[in-house]
């Protein structure tokens, strides 16, 4: 992959004082199966930044192993015919600051078990994560886990006699296996971090990257109260949408779900109807904000309701696009003019079919992940990275200025 030149992100990193702080240890990245593409992009940024970065301390012993051709640790995840597996590291990680990247929702990988081809499930990805931690054998100085979509994140609270899988997994990783930091994105319920109160838990929101992708792909958005509105598809996502509406300076609406609590279908109570609460959406573009697309049925129903209320264009912005029931319903919604664009990040697996869809827009998070890793490796605060309000406002101002220039240029011609 081609080297990336020094960018504004590197300038920001230098502004944080990163080059002048001693790293926790030599940086090492372990990519579990399915995360190789994301890990390579992150590694490309890190090698470029550290090669270009000026620091009088880079040659000192405290910065040993600071500048390398790659930070990806050579690791194999072997599967046996019985379905068992193991992780083998082919290089030392003694004293390293290890970051293990694990996408628990990559269903595109398969393995053979007793002659059958089996797809990876979240449980098997989680097992690979534990194998990687076990292979480190306590030799690393610190172990950090980057798990973009939190394992069993939807199984976070108890309403009856049921398991608390997410809390148990966090305790197993941090209490029993020595993980110091969990970095996740847009957790379904960030309060699950209460299971590990003495360990680091960073819940990162991709708000800036989402807005950047939206303004990059659609140049004619009018970001004001009269032309744009943020929509929450349910009451659970209101805090996420409040942040969007606040930094964008636009109105907020919400749907609430009427469910049939007497029936359970596929592990949940079926939705009877979506009811809208909010200002008039007629003639306005709408941003439907949520943490994930699972089947997508709720998202399409919300978009359909908005169209019935005479909304203009509708954009769906979610961190994770799982599309468990396939893409056909989204194709139909796009063809019918119900949806104008779907934005999801590259933090989880995207099928080749999805990447070719005209309604799909990818939000690249590799640069942001690289900056988080670089900052944590230097043991610096990530607070400013987790609150990008100033960057969002600057982006919106620049976007509006570009629109004015385009309008002026069109008028002069």
Image (cartoon, rainbow, N blue to C red):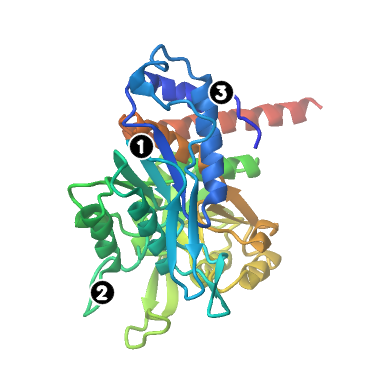
The residue pinned by badge 1 equals 96
Locate residue 57 relative to residue 320 in the image: left or right: left
Is 412 on the left or on the right of 346, as rendered?
right
Q: CA distance from mark 2 to mark 3?
A: 48 Å
* Horizontal and vertical percent position of residue 263: 36, 87
Crowding at label 1, few (<14), some or many (≥20) Cα neighbours within 10 Å? many
Q: Residue 163, labelled with which disc?
A: 2
Is label 1 or label 3 in front? 1
Dividing the picture into quadrants, the one containing residue 353 is: bottom right
* Mark 3, secondary structure of its residue: loop
Q: Relative to 297, does residue 29 appear above or below in the rendering?
A: above
In the image, 296 versus 226, the foreground residue is 296
**x%, y% of residue 396?**
52, 34
Residue 114: image tag: none
Residue 6: mark in rendering: 3
Quadrant occupied by the C terminus = top right
Judge left or right: residue 413 versus residue 361: right
Q: Is residue 317 above or below residue 53?
A: below
Q: CA distance from mark 2 to mark 1?
A: 35 Å
Sequence-wise first label, 2 or 3: 3
């Amino acid at each position: 992959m081609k080297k990336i030149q020094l960018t504004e992100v590197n300038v920001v990193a230098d502004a944080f004082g990163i080059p002048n702080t001693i790293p926790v240890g030599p940086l090492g990245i372990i990519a579990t199966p399915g995360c190789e593409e994301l890990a390579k992009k992150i590694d490309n940024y890190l090698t470029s930044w550290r090669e270009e970065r000026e620091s009088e301390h880079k040659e000192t012993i405290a910065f040993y192993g600071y500048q390398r051709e790659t930070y990806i640790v050579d690791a194999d995840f072997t599967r046996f015919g019985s379905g068992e597996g193991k992780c083998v590291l082919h290089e030392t990680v003694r004293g390293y600051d290890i970051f293990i990247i694990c996408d628990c929702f990559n269903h595109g990988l398969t393995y053979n078990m007793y002659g059958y081809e089996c797809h990876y499930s979240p449980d098997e990805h989680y097992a690979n994560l534990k194998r990687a931690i076990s292979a480190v054998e306590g030799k690393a100085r610190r172990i950090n886990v980057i798990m973009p979509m939190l394992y069993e994140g939807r199984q976070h609270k108890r309403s009856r006699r049921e398991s608390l899988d997410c809390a148990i997994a966090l305790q197993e990783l941090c209490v029993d296996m020595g993980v110091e930091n969990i970095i996740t994105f847009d957790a379904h319920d960030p309060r699950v971090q209460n299971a590990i109160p003495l360990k680091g838990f960073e819940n990162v929101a991709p708000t800036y990257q989402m807005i950047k992708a939206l303004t990059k792909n659609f140049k004619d958005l009018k970001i004001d109260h009269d032309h744009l509105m943020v929509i929450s598809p349910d009451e659970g996502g209101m805090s996420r949408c409040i942040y969007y509406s606040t930094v964008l300076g636009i109105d907020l609406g919400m749907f609430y779900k009427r469910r049939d609590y007497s029936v359970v279908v596929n592990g949940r109570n079926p939705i009877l109807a979506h009811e809208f609460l909010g200002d008039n959406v007629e003639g306005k573009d709408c941003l439907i904000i949520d943490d994930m697309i699972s089947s997508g049925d709720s998202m399409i129903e919300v978009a359909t309701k908005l169209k019935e209320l005479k909304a203009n264009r509708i954009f769906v912005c979610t961190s994770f696009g799982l599309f468990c029931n396939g893409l056909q319903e989204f194709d139909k919604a796009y063809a019918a003019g119900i949806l104008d664009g779907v934005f999801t990040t590259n933090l989880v697996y995207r099928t080749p079919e999805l990447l070719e869809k005209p309604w799909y827009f990818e939000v690249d998070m590799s640069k942001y992940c690289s900056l988080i890793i670089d900052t944590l490796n230097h043991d610096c605060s990530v607070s400013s990275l987790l609150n990008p309000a100033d960057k969002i406002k600057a982006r919106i101002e620049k976007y509006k200025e570009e629109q004015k220039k385009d309008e002026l240029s069109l008028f002069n011609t």
